[in-house]
Image (spheres, rainbow, N blue to C red):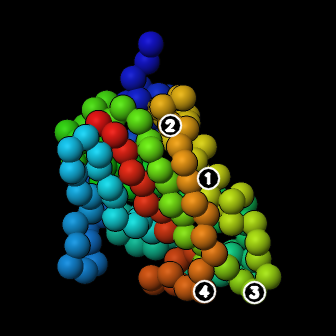
C-alpha cells in the first residue's frame, strides 16, 4: 500500500509552503482528531495565479485547475498542523467558493478540481462531503477558494 505522500509524489506534486495568513487568523486549527483549514486561494509563491469571475474572465475548466491549486494549499495547511501529510486519515468535508458571473451554475464542476485531488492522494479516504457555493466576489479577485476538514 502506498502512502498519501507517495501518491502525491507520483502525481508530480509536492506540498507548497503554507500560505501566510492575510489577516487575524491561522492557516489551520486542530480540535481533537479534526483539523479545519482556513480558506485557501490559488496562490503560487504567494501570488494569485489568476483573477476574475468564472463564466466570464475565467473558464470553468481553468477554474477547476485553480481549485486544485487551492486544494493543495489547504492540504499543506492541514498537514502542517497534523505533523505531516501521512498523519491525515480522511478528508471529511470540502467547501468550495466560486466567484461566479451572472447565470453561471457549474460550481460543482469547478470544485471537482479540488475533490479529485483528494481522491487521487487519499483514495477512498479522500471521498468527502462537499458544498460548492457561487459567490459574487472573493478576496483579491480570486476565482475560487477552498477549505477542508480532515481527520487525523
CA–CA distance between discs 4 and 3? 9 Å
Instruction: Tell me which label, 1 or 2, sits earlier in the chain.
Output: 1
116 in relation to 99, above or below: above
Residue in the image at 40% along x and 67% along y: 39
Could you tell me which secondary element the residue under label 2 belongs to? helix
Image quarter of residue 36: bottom left
- Specify whether residue 65 is in view: no
Q: Which residue is mark 4?
A: 136
Q: Which residue is mark 3?
A: 102
- Specify whether residue 147 is in view: yes
CA–CA distance between discs 1 and 4? 20 Å
Could you tell me which secondary element the residue under label 4 belongs to? loop
Q: Which mark is residue 113?
A: 1
Residue in the image at 75% along x and 66% along y: 106
CA–CA distance between discs 2 and 4? 29 Å
Image quarter of residue 79: top left
Q: Position of residue 134 (x, y in %)?
A: 63, 75
Query: How packed is label 3: few (under 14 Cα within 10 Å), some, or many (20 or more)?
Result: few
CA–CA distance between discs 1 and 2? 13 Å
Image quarter in which the N terminus is found = top left
Amino acid at each position: 500500500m502506498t502512502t498519501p505522500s507517495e501518491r502525491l509524489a507520483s502525481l508530480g506534486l509536492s506540498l507548497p509552503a503554507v500560505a501566510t495568513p492575510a489577516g487575524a487568523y491561522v492557516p489551520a486549527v486542530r480540535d481533537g482528531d479534526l483539523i479545519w483549514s482556513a480558506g485557501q486561494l490559488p496562490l503560487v509563491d504567494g501570488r494569485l495565479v489568476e483573477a476574475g469571475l468564472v463564466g466570464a474572465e475565467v473558464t470553468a475548466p481553468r477554474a477547476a485547475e485553480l481549485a486544485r491549486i487551492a486544494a493543495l494549499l489547504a492540504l499543506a495547511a492541514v498537514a502542517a498542523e497534523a505533523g505531516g501529510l501521512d498523519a491525515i486519515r480522511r478528508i471529511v468535508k470540502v467547501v468550495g467558493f466560486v466567484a461566479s458571473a451572472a447565470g453561471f451554475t457549474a460550481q460543482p464542476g469547478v470544485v471537482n478540481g479540488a475533490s479529485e485531488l483528494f481522491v487521487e492522494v487519499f483514495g477512498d479516504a479522500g471521498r468527502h462531503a462537499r458544498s460548492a457555493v457561487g459567490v459574487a466576489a472573493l478576496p483579491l479577485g480570486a476565482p475560487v477558494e477552498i477549505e477542508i476538514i480532515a481527520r487525523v
